[in-house]
Amino acid sequence: MQPLPGFRDFRPDDCAARNYIFARWRDVAGRYGFVEWDGPLLEPTDLYRKKSGPEIIDQLFNFIDKGEREVALRPELTPTLARVIAAHEREFKKPLKWFSIGPFFRYEKQQRGRLREHFQLNCDIIGEKKIDADVELVCLAIDVLRSFGFTENDFFVRLNERLAWADYFAKKGGDVLRVNDLYHVIDKIGRQPREITEATLEGLNMNPQDVWNFIEDPSWYSGFFAGFKNLLAERGMDRFVEFDPTIVRGLDYYTGIVFEVFDRRKKLRAIAGGGRYDNLIEQLSDGAISMPALGFAMGDVVLGELINEAAAARDQMQKAIAAGRKIDVYIVIAKEQRRADALAQIQQLRDRGYRVDYPLTAEKVGKQFQTAEDLGASLALLYGDEWPQVKVKNLATREESLIAHQALLDSVAKFFNVSASA
Amino acid sequence: MQPLPGFRDFRPDDCAARNYIFARWRDVAGRYGFVEWDGPLLEPTDLYRKKSGPEIIDQLFNFIDKGEREVALRPELTPTLARVIAAHEREFKKPLKWFSIGPFFRYEKQQRGRLREHFQLNCDIIGEKKIDADVELVCLAIDVLRSFGFTENDFFVRLNERLAWADYFAKKGGDVLRVNDLYHVIDKIGRQPREITEATLEGLNMNPQDVWNFIEDPSWYSGFFAGFKNLLAERGMDRFVEFDPTIVRGLDYYTGIVFEVFDRRKKLRAIAGGGRYDNLIEQLSDGAISMPALGFAMGDVVLGELINEAAAARDQMQKAIAAGRKIDVYIVIAKEQRRADALAQIQQLRDRGYRVDYPLTAEKVGKQFQTAEDLGASLALLYGDEWPQVKVKNLATREESLIAHQALLDSVAKFFNVSASA
């Protein structure tokens, strides 16, 4: 009688919190002129096999379907995006700014901030190779988090240029064809013992001391960093970003800037991550279409933890949820003989778009008013001895009045128009 | 480079149509006081094995996961709902009115109106055994379709009481333990040759002529039908409903009223279907909790076809999509020296919640204005020689004015406040 390990039931409170996150995601993406799209939840396993890197493949929920196809629940969205763009790019003006919100799946060990089914916001810009697109994307990630009530005291972006490592690696005599192996080692710094890191580096003919030196002082790449910081400063967003050579991301397809968003106290896993993948569309279209691209994904799980740990963000969420849940009108049926009249009125109110509730079966009047309060109703309409008048109660002010039932619709409309503009 | 057969990519136009459907579903469920919840997309296969009936089991997307668990992509929501209610019912006041919107999966032959991944609205009432709940649910299904612009000329509800068949079957000497087999035969009438139907009925010791007689004249159950029709008439909803003994639904867990919604021309498959399943929660909780329940599901595929075939509904959708896609402000960068000033302004406008777009890199002014039109912008702000003034163009009226850049935010806010109340 439990969901599978790593999967969640979303009871109404959980679902409201999830929808609150989705609404903020959708709102801020819209402010940036991003348009929504989505892909299938199940894809051919081959879509991930070569492009995503070993970590994702090990963690696939993959199987053989009844038609003997190798299929996988999607672990990430970027390969699907590249597939869709490669097939349909002529339909769209470039650059594209697309976002998507949906579930993703990874079969991995359960730990804090990681589940087997989670939800992500994905935002991508396709068809623009200039750094202005990178800045736009990073600012979007920042503004998404700001919309939850977070400030630079709560989170920050760690950003790097992968090519800085590639250049350095080449300069030090590394094998360019094995640069992805270098990225995997750098990506795991801090998550595995220093001895293992150093041994792996030596296996790549890279002197570990050179790596530590670069991390300590990446000054020969500081021109890039300074330029990027200036572009952020134009928008007043530089305070959110730090440059960090240890950020390279675990996925093989990244080709340029990469970034991850962390809570300032560094207590949680990454809240979001992304970067440039200028070659992926070309690879997936077998060379037919070449198009620069970049994107990031933000998950709901770590974000949800961050919201719950920050009083201001949590309050903002709870207020939004409470406001979104309120109904407009509760119908109190004091006499069962009036039920048919009440139902006719309920139908008319709902037809006009009001959120209306009532007791499905006979209940005491006091209990009905309690339910009206619990549901956050603005008005209660009481059908009882006053018929053909109806008692209208403003549940905020406790004011009551008697209205002829034929005049009720107008009266309710007037109340909500006044309330809305008040 | 294709999605799997039966799976869909949702490019922005498709996604907007899908979101339009979701928004109408969510809106009308809210008017009825239903609250949103959701379950996992993957569940233990056992959840479906005994309760859903043979048709669903044959069509499961099921597999063994890396932890040796038998799991299945959810084909329907009701067993998950029963599981969640059985585990948590004490947290909630009864009756519950819950709805959910999400993807479902069936491995079945591809045909019109059926896909392997589709989306459903599910609405359920839990904890009320009286017929008033059945009427509320049927009215909700009707009002959901009305919200798309459909009338009684476009669709109708075919409704039946399963117990009518059970009673008749018992009366004619049928084996009560095999009543589900009878339902399966009735469910397939019209989808399989009459000879097969009759042979199967004979295998159940049921005289086929008795079945045809009942369908022709179900008068001995007309008391129920008349009562139900009266309750619909109180709300003015009886014109949408017809009683039809051949509607029994293919799932084994239904126990009372069942219904399906069809297009009037009967060209399409069922748009929605549901009914009472008063025993399912008890079965899934091994008898620990007994709670009456009823619900329906409506899929996005047949509904989408119906919308596209009905001019009024299609126009309503296209207008809503166009309105939802519009941005507020487009920033025209006529001189690249002004880009930094423009970006500072863009950041401030987006901070205030406006939907703002601009060219990521240098573009001709004429092309920028074209993009502003294409994106449905209300205002264009031009950054050029007029600096430190900015040219503001109302794209609907073509009026232009020059505003000092420090005064722009106030000026834009005033414009949108006036527009909103106009």
Image: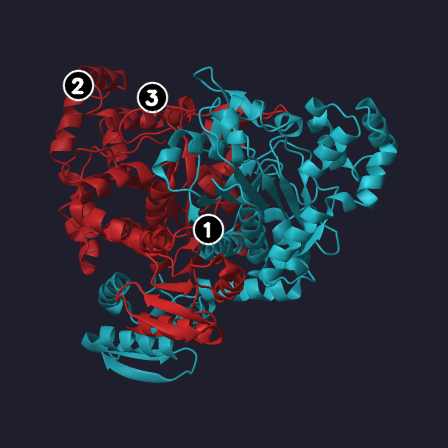
Chain colours: A red, B cyan
Q: Residue B243 or B273: which is nearer the viewer? A: B243
The image position of residue B314, as x and y in percent, is 61, 62
Q: Chain of mark 2?
A: A
Could you tell me the amino acid type at mark 1?
Ala
Give the structural element (helix, strand or loop) at label 1: loop
Q: Which mark is residue A362?
A: 1
**Crowd class of label 2 (few under 14; some 14 to 19; many from 20; radius 10 Å):** few
Q: Which mark is residue A238?
A: none
Could you tell me the amino acid type at mark 3?
Lys
| Above or below for B356 versus A1 | below
Q: Are marks 1 and 3 on the same chain?
A: yes
The image position of residue B91, as x and y in percent, is 34, 37
Q: Earlier in the sequence, mark 1 or mark 2?
A: 2
| Mark nearer the viewer, 3 or 2 | 3
**Crowd class of label 1 (few under 14; some 14 to 19; many from 20; radius 10 Å):** few
| Above or below for A246 versus B10 | above
Kindly identify which residue carries mark 2. Answer: A194
Could you tell me the amino acid type at mark 2?
Arg
| Mark nearer the viewer, 1 or 2 | 1
CA gap, disc 1 and disc 2: 71 Å
